[in-house]
Amino acid sequence: MKQLTCLDTPYFFHFHSTITDGKLTIYDYFKFCKKNQIKTLIFSEHVRKNLNYDFDIFIDEIKKTSDLFPEVDYIIGVEAKLLPGGECDVPKNILNKIDLIAFACHGFPNDPDLFYNSMENLFHHTDYQQLYRVWAHPGRFYKKRNLLQHFQNEYHTLIKMASNLNIYIERNIRDDLITYNDLKTIKQSSLIWGMDAHINNDLSRWTTLRNEQNSVINSN
């Protein structure tokens, strides 16, 4: 399984542009990275099986903008929601155009057993194993339903399972639900920090995130 080597240097992950529901352009993100000496932009734009934008135009804009910022590398990725059963809500024809898929729980049925089984199936789904895989917003399903206390064992098991399968686990700065006990079972190489940025104020929080990243990089 290939590894995200860019995590050893400053990177910016989990953000959304004006292509979908963000308020910042792709140019804004590249400019921000140059200003803050961030080496890699890891894109995670929203997708659905029925897209309301042209994904090829999205890729072309990234490539054209990157020419203006040669000091900033990029990885093209998407954020797709988990579907009951264990698939992602992503068009099949996009999978060979991206390097990374971040799967998240948005609008999933209120069924903890179905969620657990679907996540387990997703972890082993062969359609996504050629990509860098990230579990975005881990714990959100349980948190939104006030189930974290009652399903701690299930959540911890999924966290450990993902780590063992070389799936990256996001430490989301908005709703970081990875506990100290989780951290003890996760390989440090499996952690990826994310912002879920949409607006300028989200970018202003970068300093906090960068300091956390640097502390991990320096400890390795």
Image: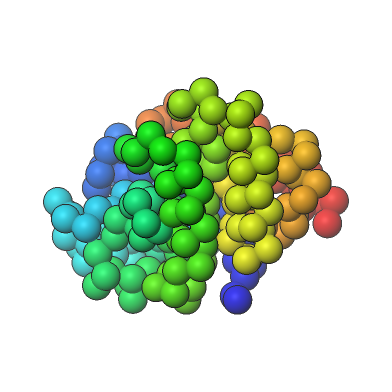
Give how far across and how far down residue 9 sits, in percent. Answer: 67, 57
In the picture, the quarter occupied by the C terminus is bottom right
- Seen at 24% across and 64% down, the residue is 91
- Seen at 47% across and 39% down, the residue is 112
- Does residue 193 appear in the picture of this structure? no
Residue 164 lies in quadrant:
bottom right
Eyeballing the image, is 130 above or below 36? below
Eyeballing the image, is 104 above or below 199? below
- Seen at 71% across and 35% down, the residue is 179
- Does residue 88 appear in the picture of this structure? yes
Residue 186 appears left or right of 83: right
Give how far across and how far down residue 177 sits, in percent. Answer: 61, 34
- Seen at 68% across and 53% down, the residue is 160
Residue 106 lies in quadrant:
top left
Eyeballing the image, is 40 above or below 199? below
Seen as rendered, the residue at the extreme right is 219
Q: In this orientation, which residue lies closer to the viewer: 196 or 179? A: 179
Q: In this orientation, which residue lies closer to the viewer: 162 or 170? A: 162
Q: In this orientation, which residue lies closer to the viewer: 193 or 8? A: 193
